[in-house]
Image (spheres, helix red, strand yellow):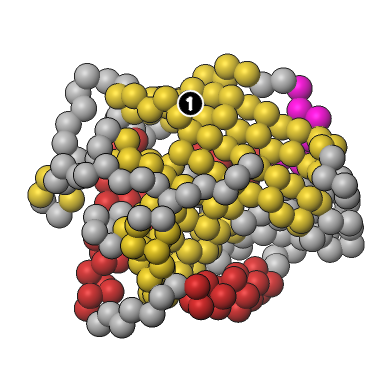
């Protein structure tokens, strides 16, 4: 989200401090202690990052609908501006995304940036871009129970934060929740970085559901946060993004493999409870 008339500069130290020293510490207190050996932790990380790669590839075989709403709010919570975009997506065999916009009224909120739109298609629905997994340090935090799911919690931090002045690369910083049976990500919470003094991003929670009894695809993203800009007033933003109408887009859908073996048929599990809008 952008704020005008500010000097561009990196604010990476603030981001890392806020997401690790603050929310990350409290997250460890929330998660139940579970003493896993390092080899077991490494095995879990290898499994869920491999499946993350395969699920992202599997999404290329599906069409789906995305309903994205981003609002700026006043002090009393009243809506001051709105960006609403409804689209249908398909992918080709190379992973190229094609968007057909079905509803896009003239936005009354002008703070949506190209980075925000990039995050809608990448970091928010799938925190760990498959080709960028090696760019992260992934640390085990503990276990947490959400509804009927027992979940491993991992902290995800980029090894090196991109310099926005040199390269345009978006990375994720935050946490992921992994089902302890299927070893698949079912929830993420974090933001895209890098940020600058004029471009800040809210922390978003993304929830996934099983599609077709096999793939955990993102279905709901939510954020409600006051962004603080240097030399300017705060900006209160609320975001709701729904992903729906998943359907095989081509007739050549085939079983996706992980580590050389077919993914087993899985019992349908309820997704973690979503926050009320």
Residue at the (52%, 19%) spot, across then down:
100
Asked which secondary structure carries label 1, the reply is strand
Splitting the image into 4 quarters, where does residue 92 fall? top left
* 247 in magenta: no
Splitting the image into 4 quarters, where does residue 277 fall? top right
Horizontal and vertical percent for residue 198?
78, 55
Splitting the image into 4 quarters, where does residue 6 fall? bottom right
- Can you say whether 134 is above or below 2 in the image? below
Q: Which residue lies furthest to the left in this view?
A: 261
Residue at the (28%, 80%) spot, across then down:
36
Q: How many marks?
A: 1
Residue bearing the label numbered 1: 65
Residue range in magenta is: 106-112
Q: Nearer the viewer, residue 44 or 58?
A: 44
- Classed neighbour count for the residue bearing mark 1: other residues with Cα under 10 Å, few (<14), some (14–19), many (≥20): many
Horizontal and vertical percent for residue 167?
57, 55
Instruction: Tell me: 262 left or right of 30.
Output: left
Q: Nearer the viewer, residue 189 or 253?
A: 189
Horizontal and vertical percent for residue 39?
22, 78
- Can you say whether 229 is above or below 251 in the image? below
Q: Can residue 166 be seen in this view?
A: no
Residue at the (41%, 55%) spot, across then down:
147
Q: Can residue 234 be seen in this view?
A: yes
Residue at the (52%, 64%) spot, across then down:
174
Instruction: Tell me: 26 left or right of 4.
Output: left
């Amino acid at each position: 989200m952008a704020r005008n008339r500010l000097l561009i500069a990196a604010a990476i130290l603030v981001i890392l401090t806020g997401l690790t020293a603050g929310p990350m510490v409290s997250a460890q207190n929330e998660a139940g202690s579970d003493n896993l050996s390092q080899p077991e932790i490494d095995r879990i990380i290898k499994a869920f990052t491999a499946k993350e790669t395969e699920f992202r590839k599997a999404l290329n075989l599906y069409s789906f609908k995305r309903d994205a709403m981003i609002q700026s709010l006043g002090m009393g919570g009243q809506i001051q501006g709105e960006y609403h975009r409804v689209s249908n997506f398909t992918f080709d065999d190379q992973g190229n995304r094609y968007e057909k916009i079905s509803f896009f009224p003239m936005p009354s909120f002008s703070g949506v940036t190209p980075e925000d739109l990039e995050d809608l298609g990448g970091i928010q629905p799938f925190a760990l871009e498959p080709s960028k997994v090696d760019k992260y340090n992934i640390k085990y935090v503990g276990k947490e129970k959400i509804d009927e799911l027992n979940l491993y919690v991992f902290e995800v931090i980029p090894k090196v934060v991109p310099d926005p002045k040199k390269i345009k690369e978006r990375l994720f910083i935050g946490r992921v929740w992994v089902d302890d049976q299927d070893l698949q990500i079912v929830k993420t919470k974090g933001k895209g970085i890098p940020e600058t003094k004029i471009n800040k991003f809210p922390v978003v929670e993304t929830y996934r559901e099983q599609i077709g009894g096999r793939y955990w695809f993102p279905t709901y993203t939510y954020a409600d946060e006051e962004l603080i800009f240097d030399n300017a007033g705060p900006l209160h933003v609320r975001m709701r993004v729904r992903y729906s109408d998943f359907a095989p887009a081509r007739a050549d859908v085939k079983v996706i493999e992980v580590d050389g073996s077919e993914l087993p048929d899985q019992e349908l599990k309820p997704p973690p409870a979503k926050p009320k809008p």
